[in-house]
Image: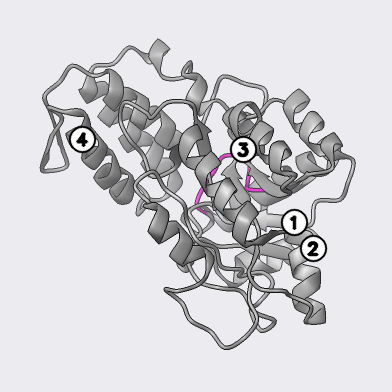
Amino acid sequence: MYHGVVRQALTVSDYCFITETQFREQMEYLAKHCRVVSLSDALQRLRTGSVDAPTVVITFDDGYQNVFDVAFPILREFYFPATVFVNTGFVGSSETIWFCHLIQALANTHNRYLEWRGLKLDLSTASAKAMASKNLQGLLKKLNHSDLLEQLDEIIEKLQVDDSLLGSAPEFRILDRDAIAAMAKSGLIEFGAHTASHSILTRVPINRARDEIEQSVGSISDWTGHACRLFAYPNGGSSDYDHKTLKILKDCGIHAAATTIQGPNTADTPMLELRRYGVHPRLTSLSFQCKVHHLFYRSNAEAT
């Protein structure tokens, strides 16, 4: 599971953004040692018991423009298919996901520390800012979405950063419709929904959760010309969706949904609770290889 792929490392490092060099090295390894298939193909193989290990699916969450600008040319080189799950509410705009605003605010602040909710967080170095970002994101994600946005505004105000700096960074921009169309036309990229605004679905009222899913599924269907059958849960942990969420997905015609819970998928894995391995900038080559081959999660069953 990938998110963004950037040409140069971010000033304030974040789990979701790896470099072009890292991505290329990982694709080179997959080309030598694995079969890379689309998610739809992998699901069919699981159903029919025709998985040839090691089989890998490449997915991207959020739908950053850098997936098109940086990752897609590399995928084309290797002729690797991939699935991109898009937060459709930001497509074609300068707006982006809330935690990207936080990263930008931390990168641009001149403050040496942040006091918030009884905490005093060190901001004196880039690495300290990265740790502060990680801690703040973890705390904010525990709030319902409206409170999260309110607290985010308070944090950004405390950081004393010009609002004009928070929507412009190209690293955090979401895909536009031309990029979506070009990737869909290539035959290598399939698209799935990821909600409209990246709201964690158990942190919003159920009617809002339904709207988030329906809007995202509808937009993907309209933009690609194909019914959207794939979905990825924002944040994707076991507490970030529930039986109500699963019912909404079924009502929307979703056939498969991806979590961020790590591990292999087998024929017994619920199709609306697929597992994935996360790829992040501090992942070593050896750890990447261990994830690819399920060495952290041994199973006797065939898996993707």
Location of residue 130 by image quarter: top left
Image quadrant for the C terminus? bottom right
Write down the residue under mark 4: 127
Q: Which residue is mark 1?
A: 38
Q: Are marks 1 and 2 in contact (CB under 8 Å)?
A: yes
Where is residue 288? Give x, y as percent.
Answer: 45, 57
In depth, the one of 180 and 189 nearer the eye is 189
Say whether disc 2 or disc 4 marks the residue closer to the N-terminus.
2
Question: In 3D space, how far apart are the residues under numbered discs 1 and 4 (Cα atoms)?
Answer: 36 Å
Is 215 above or below relative to 299?
above
Residue linked to disc 3: 63
Q: CA distance from mark 1 to mark 3?
A: 17 Å
Name which of mark 1 and mark 3 comes first in the sequence: 1
Name the secondary structure under disc 2. helix
Residue shown at 44% from the left, 38% from the top: 17
Q: For residue 255, what is the image quadrant?
A: bottom right
Mark 3 residue element: loop
Q: Is residue 251 visible?
A: no
Disc 1 residue type?
Ser
Name the residue located 67 percent from the left edge and 45 percent from the top edge. 84
The relative height of residue 108 versus residue 257 in the rendered view (above or below) is above
Q: Whole-Å distance between the Cαs marked 2 and 3?
A: 21 Å
Q: CA distance from mark 1 to mark 2?
A: 5 Å
**Residue under circle 2?**
41
